Image (cartoon, grey):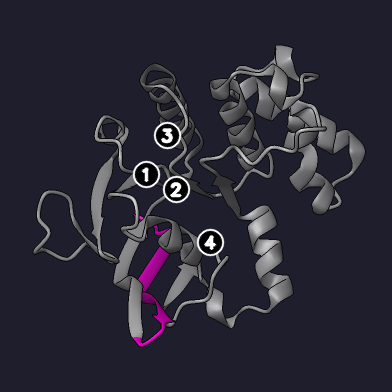
Amino acid sequence: MSIALRAEGLSRHYTVGEATVRAVDEVSLSVSPGELLVVRGSSGAGKTTLLNLLGGLESPTAGQVWVGDRELTSLSENELAELRRTGLGYIFQGFGLIPVLSAAENVEVPLRLARTEAAERDARVAEALALVGLSDHAAQRPAELSGGQQQRVGIARALVSRPGILLADEPTGQLDSGTAATVMDLISGLVHDRGIAAIVSTHDPLLVQRADRVLEMHDGRLRAAGDLSAPAR
């Protein structure tokens, strides 16, 4: 099976006064196309920092990350920005929508940044909104949408560039349990139907049921689920 994203010995340490905070500590993992990998852990375990490192949003203290055959720390800022625009999709806990823009305009933002032509933008935005069941809400602004609908707009925005890798940081953290389950079912279906490699962080035990594989994060270290003595693979 091919590997879409791989990390080896990944660490991110901070110095706070005289103390060293090991936000991510010697993490190794891989995820394949069509696989939904859930990283489970409590708040402060290091999940957000890990996703930022995997997506090239932060630089590691040590270790490496490969997206396909491209190693992130060897890329220039322009190359990293291009990879984030086209190869990686992000879903955020806080939705991250621009309040003055409609749902369609929010979804369109990555394509505008990539200077995609107008006709192609329109087609992709319509496709992405249809995928998440929001075709009838394209003209509505975030304040006119429910929390679940806002998160589905966020998912559409993450998918509109047709990325091979999806990173989701607590994507259901602000949703009630029923809506959260619906959103996770949507993400799981899209991952499997479209062959996307996805890494989703959560501290909600109910959401891990949708995962193909679960890893646990504790104090910056990643371990196989249910066994904090065994390293993740």
The answer to if 181 sits in the magenta stretch is no
Q: CA distance from mark 2 to mark 3?
A: 9 Å
The residue that mark 4 highlights is 55
Residue 6: percent from left, percent from top = 40, 65
Q: The C terminus appears in which quarter of the rendering?
A: bottom left
Discs 4/2, front: 4
**Mark 4 or mark 2, earlier in chain:** 4
- Give SS at disc 2: strand
Seen in the image, is 15 located left or right of residue 129?
left
Name which quarter of the figure residue 141 lies in: top right
Name which quarter of the figure residue 156 lies in: top right
Seen in the image, is 6 located left or right of residue 168?
left
The residue that mark 2 highlights is 197
**Mark 4 or mark 1, earlier in chain:** 1
Q: The N terminus appears in which quarter of the rendering?
A: bottom left
Discs 4/1, front: 4
Q: CA distance from mark 4 to mark 1?
A: 17 Å
The answer to if 9 sits in the magenta stretch is yes
Residue closer to the observer: 147 or 31: 147
